[in-house]
Image: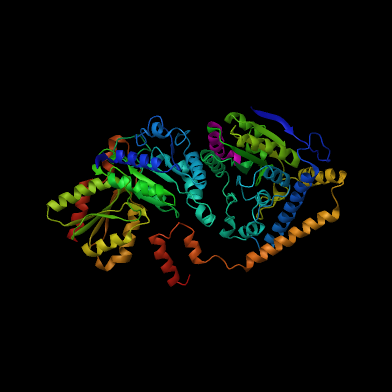
Amino acid sequence: MTTLTLAQALNQALDFALRDSPDVLVMGEDVGRTGGVFRITEGLQERYGRERVIDTPVAESGIVGVGFGMAVAGMRPVLEMQFMGFSYPAFDQVINHVSRIRNRSRHRFTAPLVLRLPYGGGIGAAEHHSESTEALYAHVPGLKVVVASRPVDAAGLLRAAIDDPDPVVFLEPIRLYRAVKEDVPDDVVTTPIGIAAVERAGTDITLLSWGAMMKEAREAADRLGGAGVSVELIDIRTLVPFDVDTVATSVAKTGRAVVIHEAPRTCGFGAEVVAQIQELCLYDLLAPVVRVTGWDTVFPLKRGEHHYLPSADRIVSAAERVLAA
Amino acid sequence: MGSDEEMLQILTPLGDLVGDAPVGLDEATELYRWMVAARAYDRKGSALQLQGRLATYAPFEGQEAAQIGSAAALEPDDWMVATYRDAAAMWHHGYPLDLLVLGRTGDERGGCPPKGLNVLPPSITVGGHMVHAVGLAWAERLKGSQRIALTYFGDGATSEGDFHEAMNFAGAFGVGCVFVCENNGWAISMPREEQTASATIAQKAVAYGMPGVLVDGNDVFAVYAATRQAVDRARAGTGPTLIEAVTYRMGPHSSADDPNRYRARETVDDWRRRDPIERMQRYLAEHGRWSAEWQAAVEQEVVADVERAVATAEALAPPTFDEMLDGMYAALPSHLVAQRAEGEEQGS
């Protein structure tokens, strides 16, 4: 065990994956010489060479499209977009090719690639650098969409994504890269895709979140717990396939739920979570399920960021309303 | 390196040899047989679409030499990444006729070629597939294999951003990919002259640091010779090539448009005089290798094969509800398991 940040855990997982299989490649803008804008691929080019850790031209569609071809030919490319907001030029490749080659060739050809998307706000970045548009990817059949909020899960889910036979969109919470530390095993760790984590067990209310907002959700859970509320805190971890069983079991028990994400509210993934909760547990609910989310606005620039991101205050306030209903 | 603005031609429209024939008479006869077969397939395909027995059909008449001449330069296990208009090339590369036809009836199972045949399902969106060929060829090099990739696209596709990204990646990394542009003059109703201000498509290669070769796309010898050279270059690890095969789409874009609305019949007639099959027929006839009876027999066999294939496809039960769900992932994930149960309950 070594205490690692989420960023270091990702680096280690990539290191082990490159070590364990010659088919694994890392490709993206500035991933080699500089180790990526967030240094997630630091040192990998030195260790594995320029043939396997590939600095590409500035061309997101090309990265994903070329990576798609590599994956079809049997490689396991791990593709980095510098920021989620820069991934849209590649969206055609993702939706029209990556997600559907298995179906359009009836399993003859597959694209087992990983698309790494650093996402989310809170670091005072420039415009387009704070996006949280996971719902766009979650809406595309044929993809898996995962997001870690802790170093062990980051390493475990990334390895599971690389080993997965299907394309995986892997969200990385920029704000948590260096904000959370945890003991991580010194060898390969995998976290199954499609399983949510009950991070804290409780009986009064279920808080549901993923990725960067788990930080605020944990803080809110601490405060509510301090006030005598028994909170069940769930880290969804995989948006697709969504672990509805774990969520429904929890909500059926507590009867109250708050869903927290930083993406805009309308058609955010929270809407899907709430829809599934009411389909399965409507008669167990003691109060309407509430969403605490980013607003339906463009993500504000640095000086206005505090207006946008859901805070522990907002989560506590929403939970209190749900508990009072 | 650079664009050769002189168009490579070996066989004139009158069937006269103006360069060195790249193949002997036996192989020339085989190339001709393939072009005749392709045209018979194509005309039968259009007819079947009109009868409602095939889904949307994109005819390729006029482009037989561009497709057969280039496909003939490949090794059987090379990658082919083609479009909806490239059935002749796919068929020549080994794609079973039954599967080609099955795909055209509107059935995903047509996109699943036998193991060992490295042909992706044809790209339906325009231009997004060229980058795939770059990735395929690159991966083969990384694996130490000798396989290369060849991709087909039209003149319209060169306006797509992914054409640039594919060419740029291939050039920057020296990938063994052969780009074959079938410049057939039209992107549905948009003429080539309005598609780009470039004098030729081939000259675009200069900007990517690769050779660009302009060939008479209706001259199967010229297409074969140019592609052979590009394929050898790719296999030797020397890098990519862009080939512009200048040809003409004699028919509509697809079964859904009427080309008389946007182009003059006289132009089409001009191109009819440059037909890829006729000039080869003259050449072979001159060498005593052609007879009308032989050609009719080739055509009849293809028509019978296509009829048999479409009947086989029609006799095949449509894909099941389960197959639709099963196509999405290696293993059915939890949400699709639930949706399968829901669908079955609702009678799917």
Residue B162 covered by magenta stretch = yes
Q: Position of residue B23 (x, y in %)?
A: 76, 40
- At x 73% / y 44%, what residue is drawn? B65
- At x 20% / y 58%, what residue is drawn? A205
Residue B205 covered by magenta stretch = no
Q: Quadrant of residue A308?
A: top left
Q: Is residue B338 above or below residue B330?
A: below
**Viewer-closest of A128 and B59:** B59
**Viewer-closest of B194 and B72:** B72
Q: Quadrant of residue B344?
A: bottom left
**What colour scheme does the image use?**
rainbow
Which stretch did the figure color magenta? B157-172
Q: Position of residue A268 (x, y in %)?
A: 35, 52
Main SS category, magenta section: helix
**Lateral position of residue B217 relative to residue A192, left or right:** right
Would residue A107 be seen by someone viewing this image from the given angle? yes
- At x 38% / y 46%, what residue is drawn? A170
